[in-house]
Image: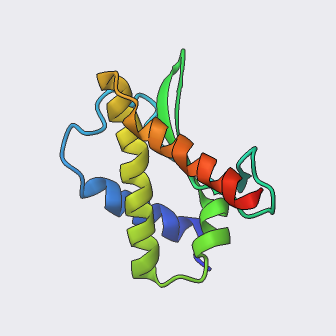
Amino acid sequence: MFTIEEVQELLDEAALALPEGIFDGLTGGVILSEDTVLHPEDRHGNLYILGQYQKDPFGSRIMIYYGSLMKIYGQASRGELYTRIEELLHHELRHHLEGRAGVDDLVREDEAFLEDYRRRDS
C-alpha cells in the first residue's frame, strides 16, 4: 500500500511529464482526494471511480481519488501504479480538452463501458 504522499509524488511526476500548456483552462488544477468513490451504478462493491473531470460555475478541475486507487492498485509495484496514474491523468485531461473543443468522444466511450458493465451483470 502506498501513502497519499507517495501517490501525490507519482501524480506530480506524471503531470510534469506533460507538455506545457496542456492544463490551460483547468482553473482548479489536479487535486488528489483521500476519498474512495464507488460509481452510482456499482452492483458488487467493485466499480470504483478513480478520477473525475469536474466543471461547474466556479471553474474546472480534475479529481483523483486516492482511496479508490488503493482499493484497485494498492498492491501494485511503484512502476505499475505510476503507469495507472499516468493513464488516469491522461483520461481526465482528455475530458477537459474535448470539453473545451466541443467534442464528446470520450464521454461516449465511458457510456459504452457502463453499458457493457450493465450487460455483463444482468
Closer to us: 42 or 70: 42
Q: Is residue 5 left or right of residue 80?
A: right
Tell me if residue 82 comes above or below residue 14 in the rendering: below
Instruction: Describe the colour scheme in one phrase.
Output: rainbow
Outermost residue to the right: 44
Q: What residue is rendered at 53% in x and 18% in y? A: 58
Outermost residue to the top: 57
Q: What residue is rendered at 38% in x and 36% in y? A: 105
Q: What residue is rendered at 47% in x and 36% in y? A: 107
Query: Total number of numbered labels?
Result: 0
Judge whether residue 102 can be spotted in this image.
yes
Can you give x and y, in whole percent of width and height, for residue 4 in the image? 58, 65
Can you give x and y, in whole percent of width and height, for residue 25 in the image? 33, 26
Q: Is residue 44 left or right of residue 114?
A: right
Quadrant of the rendering where the C terminus is positioned: bottom right
Tell me if residue 49 comes above or below residue 75 in the rendering: above
Closer to us: 101 or 73: 101
